[in-house]
Image (cartoon, rainbow, N blue to C red):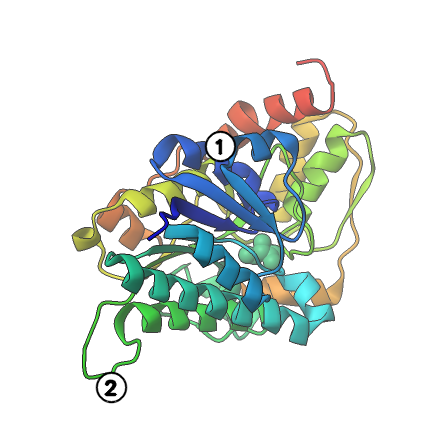
């Protein structure tokens, strides 16, 4: 039988998280990296990946071709449409975020059966799976646990929550009526807060006001923040988000008590964010011009997340708090990126 190459598959490899993940993943896995995205990778990332495929997670033929050539041992399924963008094209978002995920889960469970080992499936979910009913509840809820307020109001939040359930199904109950019971996949999922990177700016998310105001200030551009100064949701810096994914990948299975874990680092208001950006970039011109509808989405997301399960089970511990993120990671790297003096 022809030997297929053993790989870890990264979908959405050209996206924000893919950029952050691929280099660090290459240092932490003995498998080659196979990248899949609708856009081709930039040269630096392409050089790290063993192979890249430009294509769509919705294309079943492409996925079939892929498994004929590669033996997939782990999947990082990052491809998704974010929350704001999804509200403009909810049905397309459902296709990408749900059917795309289903295609990858099916591929993973079939691969598990081919090579007799459970495929590890890492899935980034989001604070968008929460839906707090009103501002008073948000103000009094404190740090929200994984099983509370799972009533999302956005298509993206509904898609992510359902995809989490699909992951659990493919891990524990897949074809449960079959005569021969076999193990499914090893599904592990993180619910991320807003993520801020020094190197990329997100597109189509509702937490984008944080990174947008920072990157605008570094480029000397004025920024109209689309939420109120008192808007508050959790954030974390990209290196901690990537480290969390890799730590969860490496965690011994018998340490895990759940499939889905909250992770978080700090919860500034938009005003705190703007003040911090102004300290870093004197003269930054930030105005608050709230968009009532995008603000309403933020009002349904928790101000704080309870990540005690992740800390207990696999040692999650972000290294960058609010000040550390700015001082040690964001500001120095962003200054360099935009050619500013240190
Ligand atoms: N950052 C995402 C968004 O705003 C939330 O996970 O859509």
Count of marks overlaid on the render: 2
Q: Is any part of residue 154 visible from this angle?
A: no
Going by the image, does 302 lie left or right of 29? right
Q: Quadrant of residue 217?
A: top right
Q: Is residue 40 above or below residue 327?
A: below
Is mark 1 in CB contact (under 8 Å) with mark 2? no
x 44%, y 73%: residue: 150
Q: Quadrant of the C terminus?
A: top right
Q: Position of residue 338 (x, y in %)?
A: 73, 24
Q: Name the secondary structure under disc 1.
A: helix
Neighbours of disc 1 within 10 Å: few (<14), some (14-19), many (20+): some
Q: Position of residue 240 (x, y in %)?
A: 44, 38
Q: Name the secondary structure under disc 2.
A: loop
**Badge 2 is on which residue?**
177
Q: Is residue 275 above or below residue 113?
A: above
Q: Is mark 2 within 8 Å of ligand 1?
A: no
The quadrant of the picture showing ligand 1 is bottom right
Q: Position of residue 182 (x, y in %)?
A: 21, 71
x 76%, y 36%: residue: 216
Task: State which mark lies toward you, 1 or 2.
Answer: 2
Nearer to me, 239 or 153: 239
x 39%, y 30%: residue: 27
Nearer to me, 5 or 335: 5
Neighbours of disc 2 within 10 Å: few (<14), some (14-19), many (20+): few
Q: Residue furthest top?
A: 341
**Badge 1 is on which residue?**
23
The mark nearer the N terminus, 1 or 2, is: 1
């Amino acid at each position: 039988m022809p030997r297929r190459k053993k790989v870890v598959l990264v979908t959405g490899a050209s996206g924000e998280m893919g950029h952050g993940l691929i280099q660090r993943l290459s240092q932490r896995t003995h498998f080659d990296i196979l990248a899949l995205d609708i856009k081709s990778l930039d040269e630096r990332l392409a050089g790290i990946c063993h192979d890249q495929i430009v294509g769509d997670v919705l294309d079943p033929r492409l996925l079939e071709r892929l498994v004929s050539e590669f033996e997939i041992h782990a999947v990082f399924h990052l491809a998704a449409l974010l929350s704001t963008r999804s509200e403009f094209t909810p049905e397309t978002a459902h296709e990408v975020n749900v059917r795309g995920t289903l295609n990858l889960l099916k591929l993973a469970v079939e691969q598990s059966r081919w090579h007799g080992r459970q495929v590890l499936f890492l899935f980034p979910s989001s604070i968008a799976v929460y839906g707090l009913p009103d501002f008073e509840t948000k103000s009094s809820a404190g740090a929200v646990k994984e099983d509370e307020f799972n009533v999302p109001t956005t298509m993206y939040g509904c898609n992510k929550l359902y995809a989490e359930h699909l992951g659990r199904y493919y891990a524990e109950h897949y074809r449960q009526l079959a005569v021969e019971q076999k193990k499914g996949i090893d599904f592990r999922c993180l619910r991320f807060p807003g993520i801020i990177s020094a190197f990329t700016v997100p597109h189509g998310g509702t937490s984008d006001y944080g990174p947008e105001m920072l990157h605008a200030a570094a480029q000397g551009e004025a920024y109209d923040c689309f939420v109120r100064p008192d808007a508050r949701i959790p954030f974390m810096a990209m290196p901690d988000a990537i480290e969390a994914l890799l730590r969860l990948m490496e965690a011994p299975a018998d340490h895990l008590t759940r499939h889905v874990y909250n992770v978080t680092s700090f919860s500034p208001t938009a005003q705190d964010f703007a003040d911090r950006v102004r300290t870093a970039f004197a003269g930054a011109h930030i105005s608050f011009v709230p968009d009532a509808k995008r603000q309403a989405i933020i009002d349904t997301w928790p101000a704080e997340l309870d990540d005690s399960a992740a800390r207990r089970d696999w040692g999650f511990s972000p290294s960058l708090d609010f000040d550390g993120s700015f001082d040690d990671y964001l500001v120095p790297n962003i200054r360099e990126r935009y050619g500013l003096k240190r």
